[in-house]
Amino acid sequence: MRKFINKKDILIIAALLIIALAGYIYMNIISRSDMLYAEIYHEDILIKSIELNEEDDYYITLDEIPFITFHVYHGSIAFYDSSCPDKICIKSGYLKISGQSAVCLPNKTHIAVHSKDGTDIIDAVSR
C-alpha cells in the first residue's frame, strides 16, 4: 500500500507553519508600537488627533462630524456608530496597528493610526 504523506511533505508543512508563525509574531508583537495615535479626518481635513493608551475606554462624537461616534478602547479606535446606510465602516473593526485605516465613504470621514516614532507598517497609500 502506498503512503499518502511522506517525510518531504511533513517538512514542507512544518516550514510553512514556521513561516506563518514568524509573520504573525512580526505583525502582532514586534511591529506593534506602544506609542500610537489616531488621526480623524473629515473631507481630507484633520479634525482630531488622539493618543491611544491601553487604559482608555471612551466614546467620541465631534462637533465637526455629528453623525459619527468613535470608540477608543484599550489602545485601539473604531467607528462605533454612523448615519451611513451600509455601515461598512463599523464592520471594519478596531484599529490597533500602526498603518491601519478605516473609511466611511458616505460621510467622507476616515481614521488613520500611526506610531509616534514614525514607523508605520504600511508604507504606501494609493488614492
Image (cartoon, rainbow, N blue to C red):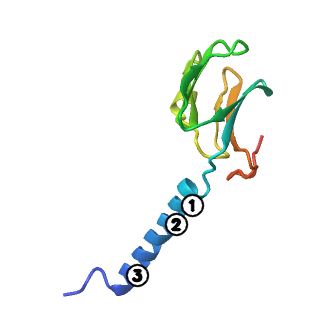
Residue receiving disc 1:
26
Would you call the spot at circle 1 few (<14 residues within 10 Å), some (14-19), or many (20 or more)? few
Secondary structure under tag 1 reads helix
Q: Residue at x 57, y 56 (%)?
A: 27
- Going by the numbered disc 3, the residue's amino acid type is Leu
- Give residue 119's position: percent from left, percent from top: 73, 52
- Element assignment for label 2: helix
Quarter in which the C terminus is drawn: top right
Distance CA(mark 2)–CA(mark 3): 16 Å
* Tag 2: amino acid: Ala
Judging depth in this view, the residue of 96 and 13 nearest the camera is 96
Dot 3 or dot 1: first in sequence order is: 3
Give x and y (percent) for residue 74. 52, 36
Q: Where residue 100 is drawn, which disc sits there? A: none
First of labels 2, 3 by sequence position: 3
Q: Which residue carries the number 3 mark?
A: 11
Circle 3 crowding by C-alpha within 10 Å: few under 14, some 14–19, many from 20: few
Q: Residue at x 51, y 31 (%)?
A: 91
Query: As displayed, is residue 1 above or below residue 116?
Result: below
Observer-nearest residue: 120 or 5? Answer: 120
Which quarter of the picture shows residue 89? top right
Nearest to the eye among marks 2 and 3: give it. Answer: 2
Mark 2 lies on residue = 22
In-front residue for pair 45/31: 31
Side of 121 where 47 appears, left or right: right
Inspect the image, locate mark 1, and give the three-letter code of the amino acid beneath it.
Tyr
Quadrant of the rendering where the N terminus is positioned:
bottom left
- Figure check: 5 above or below 107: below
Percent across and percent down for residue 103 are 65, 31
SS at mark 3 in the image: helix
Q: Marks 1 and 2: CB-CB under 8 Å? A: yes
